[in-house]
Amino acid sequence: MDEAWSPVVLAESSSSTETLLEDLWTGAIPYAVFPGFLDKSECSGVIEALKTAPMTTFKSGDALVSTLGVYLPDAVSDPDAYFARAAELEPAIASLLERGQGDVRDRIRLMFASHLKRPVVAATGPEGQEYGQGSLRVHGSGAGASVHRDVVSVDAAGWNVAEMDAQFSAVLMLQPPEAGGELTVYRQRWRPEDDTEFKNKGAKGWDPRVVEGAQVATYAAAAGDLYVFNPTQYHEVPLTSGESDRVSMQFFMAFDFEGDGPVVTFS
Ligand SMILES: O=C(O)CCC(=O)C(=O)O
């Protein structure tokens, strides 16, 4: 039988998170979660405001996915366009995420900073340009994400955030779908040699056979839950179903292990 692979709960005392960065990076834990980071009324406020936000909608299979915010893995080839788009969309994102107690992203950074005992700040490019700070996603019924991994050091080689030692994904669930849509993390990191046999040709993702037999953890987040995981491990989001869309906000965090330099955030 597999040994237990259990998440860490961030709402509890920060002493339980002393080794959080290492434990996520080495795969000792599948994810860390802060249940109810945002309260339900703040989540519904964001959902309501999204109805008039400048979202971009595309088809994913037969389902609809809408996004607001830049996503570095999709924009690595043109830094000028990436930073310009990030700056253009930032006011709309800031106005959505400015809730009673301040910008939700600042609150997330402060919470992580207190657990990690390091500053957590917005990443900036070589000329001081601010990276995108959060990508909102609306997965309509039947949408999800097939088995994949995000490895900034490889996918965004040449960008300054790609030079840092380690990278995580943070996701704030604003509205869960009726069914499906759970975070599903495999205890298996991507290896470049996987691609020859398992990388889907002409489509996103990897053949699920790549994670056959791997230990797996799933998390069905409720509205307001915030979770963080190591995206260099294979992960997926099973297709959603039912009436309500899956609405989430995602960004990456990167840092160096040596010293106590800042953790930087970007999307
Ligand atoms: O929304 C999630 O739970 C995970 C999203 C995901 O697969 C990703 O950010 O790569």
Image (cartoon, rainbow, N blue to C red):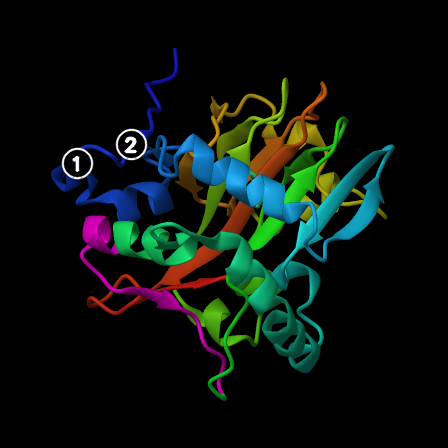
The residue sitting at 53% across, 36% down in the picture is 44
The image quadrant of residue 62 is: top right
| Residue closer to the observer: 229 or 192 | 229
Residue 50: horizontal and vertical position, in percent?
A: 64, 47
Res 267 visible: no
Q: Residues within 10 Å of mark 1 (few under 14, many from 20)?
A: few
Give the vertical position of 230 relative to 96 (above or below): above
| Residue closer to the observer: 68 or 115 | 68
Is residue 50 inside the magenta stretch? no
The image quadrant of residue 86 is: bottom right
| Residue closer to the observer: 177 or 127 | 177
Tag 1: amino acid: Ser
Q: Is mark 1 within 8 Å of ligand 1?
A: no
Q: Are marks 2 and 1 in contact (CB under 8 Å)?
A: yes
Residue 16: horizontal and vertical position, in percent?
A: 17, 36
The image quadrant of residue 102 is: bottom left
| Residue closer to the observer: 95 or 93 | 95
Residue 100 is marked as: none
Residue 37: horizontal and vertical position, in percent?
A: 35, 38
Residue ID for mark 2? 8
Give the vertical position of 265 relative to 240 (above or below): below
The residue sitting at 60% across, 49% down in the picture is 136
Horizontal side of residue 102 vs 143, given as left or right: left
The residue sitting at 55% across, 21% down in the picture is 213
For ligand 1, the image quadrant comes to top right
Tag 2: amino acid: Val
Horizontal side of residue 177 vs 250, given as left or right: right
Is residue 121 inside the magenta stretch? yes
Horizontal side of residue 81 vs 104, given as left or right: right
Residue ID for mark 1? 16
Quadrant of the image for the N terminus?
top left
Magenta stretch: give its range: 113-126
